[in-house]
Amino acid sequence: MPVGTAASVKSLTTEQLKTLSPQSSVLSPEIVLSPEIVLSPEVILCNTFHLMLRPGIERIEKLGGVHKFMSWDRAILSDSGGFQVFSLASIRKVREEGVEFRSHIDGSLQFLSPEKSIEIQSRMGVDIAMAFDECPSYGLSHADVERSMELTHRWAQRSLAARRSPLFGVVQGGVFADLRKRSVEEIGAMDFDGVALGGIAVGESKEEMFDIVNYAASLMPAGKPRYLMGVGTPEDLLDAVAAGIDMFDCVMPTRNARNGTLFTSRGKVHIKNAKYLEDEGPLDPQCDCLTCRWCTTRSTTSGSTLT
Amino acid sequence: MPVGTAASVKSLTTEQLKTLSPQSSVLSPEIVLSPEIVLSPEVILCNTFHLMLRPGIERIEKLGGVHKFMSWDRAILSDSGGFQVFSLASIRKVREEGVEFRSHIDGSLQFLSPEKSIEIQSRMGVDIAMAFDECPSYGLSHADVERSMELTHRWAQRSLAARRSPLFGVVQGGVFADLRKRSVEEIGAMDFDGVALGGIAVGESKEEMFDIVNYAASLMPAGKPRYLMGVGTPEDLLDAVAAGIDMFDCVMPTRNARNGTLFTSRGKVHIKNAKYLEDEGPLDPQCDCLTCRWCTTRSTTSGSTLT
């Protein structure tokens, strides 16, 4: 799922988003996609935390919901705001009831709870909502992560009770296998429409990450979509698919591209590096996107001539 | 001609540039264009001044010329750098030979003359080059503008002598009718492939501007393209066409759009103004571009529903 944090997938129009060129080489040189295949996402993600602060749920609702607000007529999944409250809000106070935090935009006092998050997601009119969870930092003790996970489980029950649309639960448990097992079992047993792995790619090593993803995915309910939140690089996606994951979201593709970092069949290219100043070649010799096609063909075409 | 100052028409891919939607309403509500008409520019403009400073003519030449550098396979016209030397370079020294100035990028000492400008434009490989001229500020005395115009005429002869491709001459003379008459006659009598009006829209009133444009255009050679440099608003274009002008360039369409100002059939819209916060309507009710079509139809369509 491409990420439209503030109800816009940055740098792309919705038309461009629907007709992205196939770039099989980015996934792996061995994978050959048919040229007819277009990466045309059926679901995109938007952020409850960002949208509740600006432009605010009242305004989105007044303008007909988030689909109309961003002119996207396919499915939208919203996260719950949980991850952002813990990663972006500098001042926050977690209670059983929910989380009080300061807006990073205007400093105003805000509140999110399972019921509040579900209400906002429902009023946005998304197709898939996420249960409100606490996302513990990497490096906390087993006891702290366990306490946090138990809060997430109680919040999951409250999110379910407030459900008004398809709703996914979120598994936590940090890098601890026993906690992940317990969390998959408890969240998996609840009446969610899909199950997500949260608290992944928050600072742990790739090895730790895939130990947990492989283990947790093997325990997840077979009959429900399995969603790995916030992952990842092209290689990560392939490894996670092999582990049994069905859905992903990550800001990486658009954020990296905006900042001049490109995923290619030869690895990452930092296009602003001096060595590319006079490089005439395509960004990726195995890629057939418009930009790479231009670079490949332009050495044999000449400029126009006014006659 | 859309303006690609640094060999890129900002915010548009070359493919988008070739297939711009028709927006007849922007020109005038009375003008009805066929829906099949696409504003697909045959010529775009790039800036000698900007490109000689960054990335430099050596690099552009090494990469196969400006067409290949920007992946544009239609015609390109370059200005001579004259206007920018006088409007952008903070430190400059004008002599009969040419102009010495400091780069606004790295402070390096640079030099432009008729011969140097024509050489750079030729090495870029543009389809139409412009003669190197001096563009006097608005508000100078008749005597000062006359001295400047005479220098421009001598530089025009030197530009012609250095010509290596189709070359347009530039008429100067400020807001003084007698000087414009003399300049049109002298430049028009030289062996240029087209004649441009320079030093327009540099601070004078609209009335002064069109007094000069109407008068000068009526004196310009009938058999050569007439180019009004640096103009202008949609209304300006219509008025200038009525005066006999054939070609224009202006950064206004892309620069305004990037900054949230839109030309519509109801006049300029500053879309960041608070009054548009909850405006659901199209940017222009008479426009049929993608964005306006979305706004027009979205009040009757509903968001997708996951089933």
Image (cartoon, coloured by chain):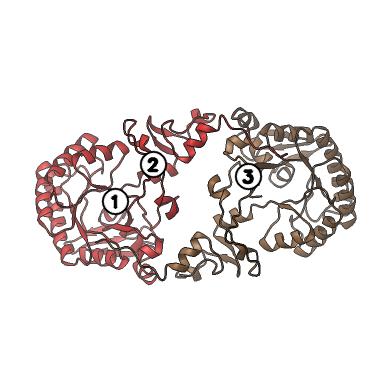
Chain colours: A red, B brown
- Which residue is the site of mark 1? A87
Q: Position of residue A294 (x, y in %)?
A: 52, 36
* Left or right relative to A71: residue A228: left
Circle 1 sits in a helix, a strand or a loop, which is it? Answer: helix
Q: Quadrant of the C terminus of chain A?
A: top right
* Left or right relative to B65: residue B129: right
Query: Looking at the rendered structure, which numbered label has been put on residue B5?
Result: 3
Q: Quadrant of residue A191?
A: bottom left
Circle 3 sits in a helix, a strand or a loop, which is it? Answer: loop
For this rendering, which residue is in front, A132 or A93? A132
For this rendering, which residue is in front, B217 or B94? B217
In this view of the protein, can residue A119 be seen by the observer? Answer: yes
For this rendering, which residue is in front, A285 or B236? A285
Upstream in sequence: badge 1 or badge 2: 2
**Residue at coordinates 61% horizontally, 68% vertically from top-left?**
B265
Query: Looking at the rendered structure, which numbered label has been put on residue A22?
Result: 2
**Which chain does tag 3 point to?**
B
Q: Are marks 1 and 2 on the same chain?
A: yes
